[in-house]
Amino acid sequence: MLFKKPQVAFYPFMVLRDDYKCVRCKSCVDQCSFDATYYDEDLNMIMNHHENCVNCKRCEAFCPTDAIKVVKNPSTFHPDANWTPEAIRDIHVQMLTGAVILTSTGNDKPIKNYFDHLLLDACQVTNPPIDPLREPMELKTFIGRKTDQLQFDSDGVSIKTTIGKQLELEIPVLFSAMSYGSINLNLQKAMAIACREFGTYWNTGEGGLHKSLREFKDHTIVQVASGRFGVDLEYLETSAAIEIKIGQGAKPGIGGHLPGEKVNEGIAETRMIPVGSDAISPAPHHDIYSIEDLRQLIYALKEATNYEKPVFVKIAAVHNVAAIACGIAHAGADAIAIDGVRGGTGATPKSLRDHVGIPIEMAIAAVDDRLRKEGLRNEVSLIAAGGFRSAVDVLKAIALGADAVYIGTVAKLAAGCTQCQQCHTGRCAWGITTNNPKLAKRLNPDIVAENLYNLLRAWAHDIKELLGAMGINAIESIKGNRLRLRSWGLTEQENKILGVLPAGM
Amino acid sequence: MSRKRKLMKVYPIEENCISCRYCEVACTMVHSESKDPVKAYKLENLLPRATVEVKEAVSLSLMCRHCKHPFCFDACISGAIMVDENGKVNLDEEKCVGCWNCVLVCPFGAAHPMIREEKRHSFKCDLCGDRGFPACVEACPNRALIYDFER
């Protein structure tokens, strides 16, 4: 290709256009935010820069005559199991740029998904299943510290013990932390509306809470991360719970960097930084170097908010996750959120996203086991995150020992995302991970809120059906109930860690 | 003294418009003989009555506003433009002689010239009269067009 490095010609995707069906409405030209499509007036034809195409499928979705298909470039490298096209292209990128390869979303490598190797139980003959459409079915979940024991009044009914502040969820699913800056206000607003309507919670992420979203206070979890963006007393108080972010599944051990050019006035005001300045979250919290330090921060936040807000701590699932989670429980957290290796992000080095951390299934099992052994399980709730795809994954995670599940990618998908892995570019053609006003307006918060509500409703129905089949009428009864799980195709060691029996036993 | 008219028309919502041109193509399609978007453009040489105006982040779909005091009605030399009892501005393409006066005077650029071998005439949004509901509103994927009583 003229004026380009030779390797640019080995692009992965192509835009195919049926020229007969193309009516030259130029919708695709306007929709493409990656400069892959343009209109040539002299030829009266829509043309493509295939090398710029990222397979976001925006043009395909918005072609009114269905004339476009984005396809894999049929021209491939020589088939080689070791030197895959991805491996070769990565070398090309690094040799041309001398930089770390940035990417986004979650791990896309074929890491074994243990949820796919777990099977749920059902009732037959001796213990009848329940029909969720005819009988009440309870999905209500409480997140927060549970007391060691309950004391009753002399009447034997009224509870004397004071129970700490709990989050009340109508479905054991919450929306993950996605900051204003990494996503735009429209998606945050859509999540907030859906949460208020359905009865669950969304998480601000580390970018502060925009003033227009303060009305959703009772359904908002505010995050305190290493950058401390937007944190002040009002922020902490405008919440249902506070989450200290230590790590993230897609990039355990590293911080974040929102480039200055993305920091517009709204983001600057919300994050409390100057317009156009880089928003850098350090890798560590500079005041946390031990469990004792973490305890200080937890109690500082509790003191600041009069012990009215549960304090969560979010960590990435890493090798010693069980020991770390125990430490967090000892430090006084009300809930621990664990983000597995498949967790998503708006920007991360590819090497970290794909190779650091452990699967969330193993982490849930290990943490739940350890907390039980240490007698701490009732003191913290366990929220699992990272790559949950369906209600079935949620239920399996709960059976493994989680209390609830964080979903982020799912919310993005409900907003139109096609997982093209370009969040870090800020050019999201679907208007999700961008604050460019032309692109951000593509996400209508009212429409997406309806989509998210539908999704939660569908998942609630799904979970009820599955519980009914197991003869269970409350989500509480399946929590940590690994006897209702069986595995297939796993080794003895894997079964031991997950604490499940193989199918047939 | 302004009197509320019993007129429903199409209102664009600029904040929601994503300039996808669905309104344009839907308009062209429903006003065609074939009712097929590709044939409408390629065989019948039709053009949309609603046009998407884009400038950077600002975009909106623009079509006849059915003005209270339509300049096009005053300017029409052939009596092709008539205002009905509700205030809807109708353009009779048969009567139109193609003088382009309406095209010139329309402050919104919502009347367009159609030059064909057999006949010259102007055309504009008819609120999908025979269809019952405006196609552009139905086609809009981001709720950027609403069909409502005049405010």
Image (tube, coloured by chain):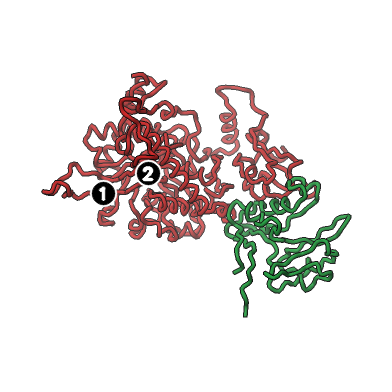
Chain colours: A red, B green
Image marks 1 and 2: residues in contact by CB distance under 8 Å: no
Image spot of residue A186 (x, y percent): 50, 54
Q: Nearer the viewer, mark 1 or mark 2?
A: 2
Residue A261 visible in rendering: no
Q: In which quarter of the image is residue B63?
A: bottom right
- Front residue of A106/B131: it is B131
Q: What residue type is labelled 2?
A: Ile
Q: Is residue B69 left or right of residue A294?
A: right
Furthest residue in direction bottom, as rendered: B1
Determine the residue positioned at 64% across, 40% down: A53
Furthest residue in direction front, as rendered: A134
Furthest residue in direction left, as rendered: A154
Determine the residue positioned at 77% across, 46% down: B39
Q: Quadrant of residue A392?
A: top left
User: Pointer 2: what residue?
Assistant: A171
Q: Quadrant of residue A270?
A: bottom left
User: Pointer 1: what residue?
Assistant: A296
Image spot of residue A57 (x, y percent): 61, 41
What crowding class fits label 2: few (fewer than 14 Cα within 10 Å), some (14-19), or many (20 or more)? many
Q: What residue type is labelled 1?
A: Gln
Image spot of residue B41 (x, y percent): 77, 49
Q: Is residue B123 left or right of residue A291?
A: right
Determine the residue positioned at 76% across, 51% down: B32
